[in-house]
Image (cartoon, rainbow, N blue to C red):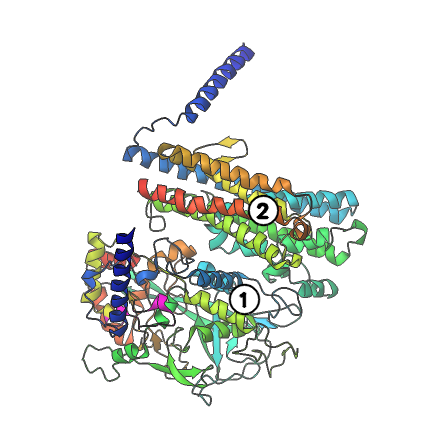
Amino acid sequence: MKSIIKTTSLVVLATVVTFTACRKKKEEVIPAVTPATAETLSQEVIVSFASTIALPQYNDMSVGAINLVNAVANLNATTTQANLVIAQQEWKNLRSTWEQSEAFLFGPVADENLDPNVDDWPVNKNDFDSVLVSTAPLNDSTVANYQTSLKGFHALEYILFDANQSKQASNITPREKQYMTAIANDLKKNCTKMYTGWAQNSGNYYHTFTTTNSVYTNKLQTLVTIVDAMASICGEVGEGKIKSVYEGQDASQEESQFSNNSFTDFRNNIIGVRNVYLGVYKANDSRGLEDIVRQYNLSLDGKIKQQMETAINSFNGFTKPFGQAIFTEATQINTTIAAINALKITLETELKPLLQANIK
Amino acid sequence: MFIQAIISRIVIIIISCTLLLIGCRKPQEINDRIENYDERLSGGQQTTFNETYDDAFPVLSASKVTTHNLGDAVFGATFVTSPAPINPGLGPVFNNVSCGSCHINNGVGKPPVNGTEQGQSFLFKLSMPGYDAHGGSVHVPNYGVQLQSRAVFGVQPEGKVSITYSNIQGEFTDGVKYNLQKPTYTITNPYMPLPAGVLMSPRLPMAVIGLGLLDALTDNWMLEHQDLNDANNDGITGKVNYVWNERTQTKTIGRFGWKATIPTIEQQVALAFNEDMGITSPLFPVESTYGQFQYDKLNDDSEINDSILSTVTFYIKSLAVTARRNVNDATVQQGKSIFKQLNCSGCHLMTARTGVNMGYTEVSNQLIFPFTDLLLHDMGSELSDNRPEFDALGSEWRTPPLWGIGLSQKINGNTHYLHDGRARSLEEAILWHGGEALQNKTAYTKLTKEDRNALIKFLQSL
């Protein structure tokens, strides 16, 4: 019985999807949106952002950081190549969540200065080496007070991957073990703060964000904050992380250079933008900015979606890691920069004005 | 086609004539009738309608936008210990690793939260009593003129500071009580014995918006508002601080910093690189630790070159001011009249016009709403740091601009005001006013609750 219902609903769904698909092509007349509908819809999008994107994603940051801490602890206890690979993978997993969350760098992550504490760059290599050769106490409390360039993702990356991704478990020194343990713990502490900053039973930025108050004076401002953050990460990736390294032809300026993870980082930044636009995170699909845009301008919605896909897919064309591609795959690099920039311009010059014209 | 060409020529001629006329016209001062202008445009044409301190001037030539963006990247860049391929020069002692780590989102810093936790965006100036050859601060042996509370690995931070707060209670005329927290500072863990009599002054990093426009106000504009003997009998004096200019090697008018001790944006940027980050530049080529126990003795100065210094300087010079919000709201307008009625506007001058500047036309001849006179005023003993700097006495502070202040909570997630962030709300900031602003503060305490709220709402609209 259940399976029949399932099949039937699939058929119905498929039919609806087919119809919808056909309908879209015809550019049907969009029904006028009443101010009340716009108000309700805006609030739904804002709440959905907080509950479907920000909270679960920062929760994943805190959970992912615990996984990383555990993997590093295992590596510390049983220093095998297999355990090193597991720790490297947990680093990449947490990195993936973080890079997606960079599509919305506002709220506690910015206000409490957590961003530089987890993701400062470059690593202060002189001091890093001094830490390793010295006999100074190396534990959670000393590392917590280190410069931000001596902890966080990239300092840990330097230990786990080494300068040329050639790390051997057998070469990990006792001092490196102490250091990686303390950095992982510090990451966990700061990733947890990202979550508790939003959580309703703690910092409750959720409340600040989803209500009208002296910080977010109206729904338009809240939505604009979201769009500005999306555009901002596009600018940072396209203009900063990719273009400046490429134009300077300077691989030493690559951010995730020890792990060769930069292209994955960049791609995840744009996936983060797409998540916010669609109101999607993992299996959950809720209200997103798309639901507002579709009320007013279907072709803009199509354009944004197409530009997001183009930007994300542009990373598929590379055959080498970023640090090498800047020398050998100029055409593809330029294509990627252009795709991300096109998306940024649309967000700034079409999406934002659409909100400003229609939302109060 | 032909007619169009003629029309466009006529238009060009008319524009040229207008430009000529504007060029000849002297910058108009406060004859500007404020009601003829859009009050939202706090920074004149360089106002942004985005609620951010991060926007460049909206009117900026393409090449200048490029420079602005280059400066932006350096402002956010983390510096590391020399020698290094990227961003070398940090330390040996410092307060922070990047400009943006103190000026988070280009906004204000915050004092340590629980009194003992070390603030990462808060610092202490130090000096011995007296004046140096230029009238500036006297170096503290082995410390210099600032307490660097952090250091590169292997070097001792100069010291930490612990803050304790005591409560001061007050009461409005309507019987409502209020509490202020008064900070006391103690240097802990000094890396060397501190000589007796050291003077210290806490400083909260300031928001960096609109400084290019303040820079464009003329010296004469400041001098015209100076009122050393209170000739107009309003209880407010106003004094220019003459300070040492590293570029000209003479004393010139100071206009930046909590005590107006900095004459130019370039000097502010270079000084911050030097004292806050331990990075030498062509303007300050000597390490902050020179002559001290922990001097690095490296032959690598200047650690940043002129082009880095000038791009960051230009970045700061081209940050837009945020537009006002809710200017037509009845309560906000009521608050605005109270602001004038209480003569808050006696120091926080509401309007100003920048000088004509053909070298930097983007800031030329703009009507702006900075809410400052850039002058020093006696703010009373409670706010005094008892540490003179050039012509500024311990109790004298420069009127801080108020533009953008209503967005500080949104930009920085917290609200801290005054030079050491002791005021946790705009109301507390008002209630700390003393000295020649005591009359205004007293007048505020006599307001009804409704009027007090209106004034705050007005400030929040800035």
Q: Quadrant of residue A28?
A: top left
Say which element carries label 2. helix
Relative to B20, A46 lies left or right: right
Question: Is residue A79 visible to us here?
Answer: yes
The percent coordinates of residue B296 (x first, y second) are: 64, 77
The residue shown at (24%, 58%) is: B38
Q: Chain of mark 2?
A: A
What residue does disc 2 label? A266
In the picture shown, does residue A277 fall above or below A175? above
Q: Chain of mark 1?
A: B
In the picture shown, does residue A75 fall above or below B408? above
Q: What residue occupies the far bottom of the structure in this picture?
A: B133
Q: Amino acid at mark 1?
A: Asn
Query: Between residues B353 and B102, which one lies in front from this camera angle?
Result: B353
The percent coordinates of residue B1 (x first, y second) are: 30, 50
Callout 2 crowding tier (Cα within 10 Å): few <14, some 14–19, many ≥20? many
Query: Between residues B196 and A279, which one lies in front from this camera angle?
Result: A279
In the picture shown, does residue B136 fall above or below A178? below
Q: Are marks 1 and 2 on the same chain?
A: no
Was residue A277 drawn as part of the magenta stretch in this picture? Answer: no
The residue shown at (48%, 48%) is: A197
Callout 1–callout 2 Cβ contact below 8 Å: no
- The residues tagged by marks 1 and 2 sit, at their Cα atoms, a distance apart of 28 Å
For the image shown, how many numbered marks are present on the structure? 2
What residue does disc 1 label? B96
Was residue B356 drawn as part of the magenta stretch in this picture? Answer: yes
The percent coordinates of residue B160 (x first, y second) are: 54, 70
Say which element carries label 1. loop
**Magenta extent:** B346-365
The percent coordinates of residue B238 (x first, y second) are: 28, 79
Give the main secondary structure of the magenta stretch.
Answer: loop
Relative to A10, B178 lies left or right: left
